[in-house]
Amino acid sequence: MLIYIIKRFLIALPLILVISLIAFIFINLTPGNFFNQMRLNPQISEETIEKYIELYQLDKPVLIQYFAWLKRIVHLDFGYSFAYNIPVTRVLGSRILNTLLLTLCSFFFTWLVALPLGIIAAVKVDRAWDRLISFFSYILLSIPTFFMAFLMLYFAYLAGILPLGGMVSANFTELTLFFKILDLLKHLIIPTLVISLGAIASLIRIMRGNLLEVLRSNYILALRARGISEKRVTYIHALRSAINPLITIFGYQISGLLSGAALTEIICNWPGLGSLMLSAVRSQDIYLVMGSMLVSSFMLIGGNLIADILLGFADPRIRVK
Amino acid sequence: MKILEIKGLNIDFKKRKSFINVVQGLDLDILESEIVGIVGESGSGKTVSTLALADLLPSGNSRVSYKSYKIKANKIDKKQIPYFRGRLISYIFQDPIPSLDPMFTIRYQFKEILKVGSRKEVDDKLMGKLLLDVGLKDIERVLSSYPHQLSGGMAQRVAIAFALGSNSKILVADEPTTALDAHIKKGILELLKKIRDEKGLSIFFISHDLEQTFYVADRVYIFYAGSIMEYAKSSVIKKSPLHPYTRALLDCVPKRGIEELKQIGGKSPNFGDLPKGCLFYPRCSFAMDICQKKRPPLVEVKKGHFLRCFKEKI
Amino acid sequence: MKELLQHRRGLIAVIILFFLYLGAIFSGFISPYHYRSEKRLLSYAPPSKIHFFDSKGGFHLRPFLYKYTMSLDENRKRVYGEDKSQVYPVEFFTKGDSYKLLGLFPADIHLFGVDSEVKIYLFGSDSRGRDLFSRIIYGGRVSLSIGLIAVIITFFIGLIVGGVAGYFGGKIDNILMRLCEMIMLVPGFYLLLALRSSFPPEIGTVKIYFLIIIILSFIGWASLARVIRGIVLGLREKEYVLAARSIGLSNFKIIIKHILPNTSSYTIIALTLSIPSYILGESALSLLGLGIQDPVPSWGNLLKDAMAIVQIKLHPWILIPGLFIFLVVVAFNMLGDALRDIYDPKRKIV
């Protein structure tokens, strides 16, 4: 079991390295682009630019730059953000937490809502509840995230009860702890809903599909034949097996959530990794772009790893060889 | 003493929007401490008929009805049938490992079943005894295993132990040895015979393998296209089969010294498209005119030997 | 194809897509105005009201419009009304802005239009007084085509990579699959932006069009390749492949003749279901200003105005392009589902 975990981990590392290499090459395909922008900025003297070029060896061939960058990464120095004028790690820091918060909230909300609904849809297959749930899932699945975000913000604007974006209100620092948390929660609602609704829809379909499939298995018939009650068969046996494949898709879920979160962050003004990525790209801030991309990959890999480990625990066929 | 008797069993399956008749007017019975073999090709209705005995066919897709259903000469109402499951009738299936829930240990599943029979004390001792009865030795290991850790033969024995544990009087063994290796098959067959003798169980032994069936069964039913073509004592069918289909089946069994492998020409019929007369007519080498027009009834041609064929002597 | 039309969802999907693509192909004809045609005076005008009854209660067979009146209220916000003094009928097959039919033939006949004194804004107008309806129709050209072209490119790459990996197995399979996993390890959005950032923010429309296609294909082929590889792996052991091998057919021929055709149903379904994500990818990029730029419309960049929530309250019609994106996504999803049902061996025809 432990070996299994270590193996998964070891596979991930070289992957990260290679992605970063590819990304680095891509980003540097058009040379000197960033500095064109900087040169236009009167506040930054030519000397400062020269210094940067020297410091980060930006005039050397790409591969050398890459290894230099890599060496710094290992020391957790992600380079310098030219746009923000501070080390990339400092810029990333708080943003990562914010995105993590949003993503985790969405994740839990998604599973909390989707699983029961998927189960209901499967158990009452082809009857009223199933048709209703399936229909809404279908629609929700197809709504683009940004459109959903616009709609929600619009309705929130009309209703006037929820804050429209941002992570905290202006008077945040003056609030007591309790109200601080409340404020945060209020701001979380819309972005979380926007991200989750699509994911919920797809998870419902998968859960329903899995459960229906399991209910057709041989051992379910055998269990019924042995006189086990329908309730037990469905909720203890069938459900148990139906959940496993879901754990497998954790990884894809997390990828989807991170992507969805990014766009939602931008529209809802949530100060996270996604909105950071956008501004980094807009200002062609290479190291920031790279850093954000890497961190998002790390989050994905981390999520996948957790999923793999959980699957190892959940499925005895893996756990006990 | 007949422990189960069903008459006029009808099973329809839903295909697209309408129902197709699969089993029509079937009569089946079994005595205490008897092994009844049910032989037929795939799709002949053998599995489906026995599943119907405990109402295990999916209710949305199937319609089951019968004229009379008696357990030990007591008439049974349709509503009572689900209670039979795990109490009166048990099943073992062709592929033993997929018939067990892969997520739970044998111990867990065993306990679960024993509780159905509402035993008060379900402990390892009881389970251990049952496992010994079916010929398993390493009790602790078996109980703690997950299904995928067992071999096919072991899993099938466990399944039989489950059946014994539930105190059922009837066991439906649906092709229990088909998925097992050759040298394991015999052990299972012996086990079935043993529990018939020692526990007085009645066993429906479903198979498409004639040899094995003759080896274990006391009586044999020959199924074709959802109908019984012939049934009699095992030895009788083996020595003097009367139905052309039965004869053809026997001919197909590879025998030593005979080089040619025989086949029955033609295809098994489509359930939506059954012939008007005798169901076997299209493939029968002894067909007569009347066979095409009328369906022969099941008739007791000799004592204990029933035949559904117009030709009495071949 | 026939079965598709018999399938309820398939039919709906085909109808929706038919009209959307028809609109895109004949965009010049169907839209009353060219996408560039502005009228700053009528900035953010609400959708035109089509009347059949005039202010005196008279019925006109032809629908007609009134001219917009624009005034400023106490907050210096624009208020639009109707000048009921004159009736302007909607004319069909009328002359209007010139355009090139199918991109080749100069023409100036439009499906419908109105006297040049008045503007017909079916879906309202944007900040520069450009007709949103026209811009949406023209926008379809970009939004609907990018996805298709990118998907075709992805198809070829994914097919080759997946086919080779699945068939040859071993080291080649390993390397190729690792490659796919690496690409799939970066969450879509981040990869999209990162790739985009390797090019300057402002480049010509044509260049950006192809750039987006390349980027989308680059992101997409990996998952398709994996799916195909899985299928090929399964097919490789089938009897007819072994038979082909035993008669000495070359590997290449086996892949082309036996294996790839059998992947076709899965592939088509996978492709159809991935088109929505390509369309959404382009829309997101354009929405964020990194994709197709103004004045060329794409459904994504038409939504840019909506980024400031205030605008939605004042001019809710700017969300309509979003509806179109939703519609095309639903249509492709339905199409994919219908295809899946048709090709499913266990299918119970409804």
Image (spheres, coloured by chain):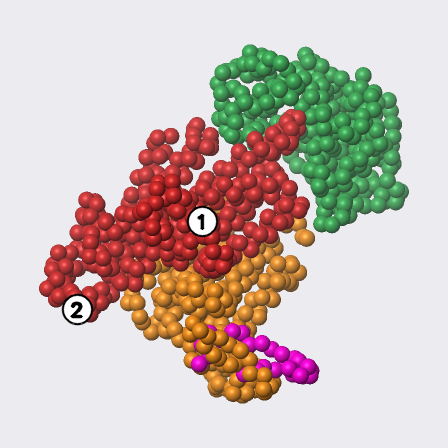
On the image, the x and y values in percent for residue C117 come to 52, 87
Question: In the depicted view, which residue is nearer to us: C296 or A24?
Answer: C296
Q: Based on the displayed image, in which of its 4 quarters is residue B43 positioned?
A: top right
Amino acid beneath label 1: Ile
**Bounds of the magenta span?**
C41-67
Judged from the image, the secondary structure of the residue bearing numbered disc 2 is: loop
Tell me where residue A34 appears, x and y as whole percent.
22, 64
- Closer to the chain start, of discs 2 and 1, is 2
Picture disc at residue A189: 1
Horizontal and vertical percent position of residue B49: 74, 33
Give me the chain that's orange.
C
Q: Colour of chain B?
A: green
Figure chain in red: A
**Residue found 46% across the figure and 39% down from its top:** A247
Q: Is residue A227 left or right of residue A16?
A: right
The residue that disc 2 covers is A42
Report how far apart the C-alphas of labels 2 and 1 lie in the structure. 42 Å
